Image: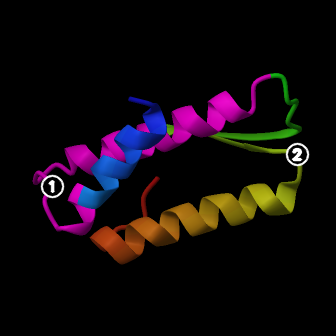
Amino acid sequence: MTKQEILDRVQNVLYQGADTESMDLDLLRHDLENDIIDGDKVGVETYYELNVPAGTYSSDNIFSLLWEVFTHRLSHLRKHGKWID
């Protein structure tokens, strides 16, 4: 089973509203997304990196980095009511 298949299954469970109080599945989903993204960027140099406690955002363009952070946090705000990484 690939990481993408695991991510798809975790997202399906999350869409059904089943998660722990501490949002363990959402954190697992976040880690899997980051790992898949990082795997896609092997050998690709990025100019901008933002290190946060939950992981790292990186991009070759400052505007796309800001957009990535904004949209990711907005998704957490929609799903969980919190502006978090």
Tell me the kind of residue under disc 2.
Answer: Asp
Residue 77 appears in which quarter of the rendering? bottom left
* Residue 46: image location, x then y, percent: 85, 36
Who comes first in sequence, dot 2 or dot 1? 1
* Residue 63: image location, x then y, percent: 83, 63
Q: Nearer the viewer, residue 61 or 35?
A: 35
Q: What residue sits 16% from the left and 49% below the top?
A: 22
Q: Secondary structure at mark 2?
A: loop
Q: Is residue 12 magenta?
A: no
Above or below, comparing residue 32 to residue 69 in the picture: above
Q: Nearer the viewer, residue 48 or 14?
A: 14
Q: CA distance from mark 2 to mark 1?
A: 34 Å
Residue 49 appears in which quarter of the rendering? top right
Residue 80 appears in which quarter of the rendering? bottom left
Q: What residue sits 83% from the left and 22% below the top?
A: 43
Q: Which residue is mark 2?
A: 60
Residue 50 appears in view:
yes
Tell me the kind of residue under disc 1.
Answer: Asp
Q: Which residue is mark 1?
A: 19
- How many badges with numbers are in the image? 2
Q: What residue sits 89% from the left and 38% below the top?
A: 47
